[in-house]
Amino acid sequence: MPKFCTLFSGSSGNCTFISDGRTNLLVDAGVSATRICAALAEIGYTPYDIDGILLTHEHRDHVSGVNVMSRNFSIPVYANSGTMEKTLSTIGWIFDDYIHTFRTNEKFSIGDIEVFPFSIPHDTVDPVGYTFRFDGEYYSVATDIGYITDNILKHLCKSKAVLIESNHDVDMLKCGPYPYPLKKRILSDRGHLSNENAAHLAAQLVKWGTKSIALGHLSEKNNTEEVAYKATAECFANNDICIGTDVNLQVAPKDGICEIC
C-alpha cells in the first residue's frame, strides 16, 4: 500500500516519508536523527526500513539530520552534485558508499519507484522538487519555491497527491519582526511561496486531477495553519472546487504526522 506523509514540515525542519509498500524513502532529513526515528515509529517504521534519503537542497532545515541517519543506519543519500557538495561541507562526512548523485531533471529509480527530480527557483546551488511514480500513480513534493515555473507545473500536473509550500501570508511578513533583507529574500523569485500563490497552484492542480493536497513549510512567524488553510479554501470556493468531494486539503503541522495519502 502506498504511504505519503510529512513527519516534519516548516521553517525549523522538514522530513517527508513516501513508500510504495516495498521501497521506503525520506525526502530531506532536517531535524535530528532521534526525532526522525521517533516519528518513523509513529507510522510503524524503523530507520532500518529506509532505503534512501533524497535531498531537495542544502539549507539546514532540510539536511541537519542526514549524516547521522546515513552513518548510523546505513542509508544511501541521493542529491545532485551541487547539493551533495554543499551539504557535506555543512553537516560533515558520510560514507562514500552511501553517496549517490543524480542529474537534475533526469529520471532515475530506487527499487520500483521512479524518481523525477525537477529544478525549482530557490536561493541555493541547485534546488529540486521531486515527483515519484509507482503503481501507475504520481506523488510530488514541491517546497522552497520562489515562484511557479512551467517546469514545476509539468512535473506536478499528473500527480495524485502533492505536498506544496504555503510559506507565508504577505501582510504578516511585511508587518512582522524579520529584518528587511530577510523579508526581501523571502518575497523574491528565489525565496518562498506565499499563501496566495500556493492557493492558485493548488486550484490548478485540482483541475488537472490532483485528489490530495497538503500545504507545508509554513513560516513560524509569518503564517498560521488557519490562515494558510483559509487562503486555499477561499480560492477553491471561487473556482467551484469542493473540499472533501473534489479534493482532500490539509495543512502539514510543524511537528506531527500529516497523512497526505
Image (cartoon, rainbow, N blue to C red):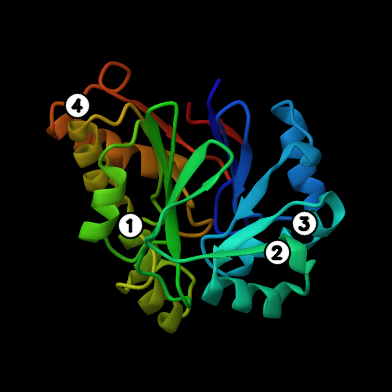
Q: Give the mark nearest the N terminus, 2 or 3.
A: 2
Q: CA distance from mark 2 to mark 1?
A: 25 Å
Disc 2 designates what residue?
64
Disc 1 designates what residue?
194
Foreground tag (4 vs 3) = 3
Q: Position of residue 145 (x, y in %)?
A: 37, 62
Q: Give the mark nearest the N terminus, 2 or 1.
A: 2
Q: Nearer the viewer, residue 39 or 236?
A: 39
Question: Which element is circle 2 on?
Answer: loop
Q: Position of residue 110 (x, y in %)?
A: 57, 45
Judge the density around disc 3: few (<14), some (14-19), many (≥20) Cα neighbours within 10 Å.
Answer: many
Foreground tag (2 vs 1) = 2
Q: CA distance from mark 4 to mark 1?
A: 20 Å
At horizontal 71% and vertical 41% (from top left) the residue drawn is 50
The answer to whether the residue labelled 4 contacts the one labelled 2, judged by CB atoms less than 8 Å apart, is: no
Q: Is residue 218 above or below residue 177?
A: above
Q: Is residue 57 above or below residue 165?
A: below
Q: Give the mark nearest the N terminus, 4 or 1.
A: 1
Q: Amino acid at mark 4?
A: Ile
Q: Is residue 55 above or below residue 109?
A: below
Disc 4 designates what residue?
241
Question: Which element is circle 3 on?
Answer: helix
Q: Amino acid at mark 2?
A: Ser
> Which numbered marker is on residue 70?
3
Question: Which element is circle 1 on?
Answer: loop
Q: Position of residue 36 (x, y in %)?
A: 74, 45
Judge the density around disc 2: few (<14), some (14-19), many (≥20) Cα neighbours within 10 Å.
Answer: many
The answer to whether the residue labelled 2 contacts the one labelled 3, judged by CB atoms less than 8 Å apart, is: no
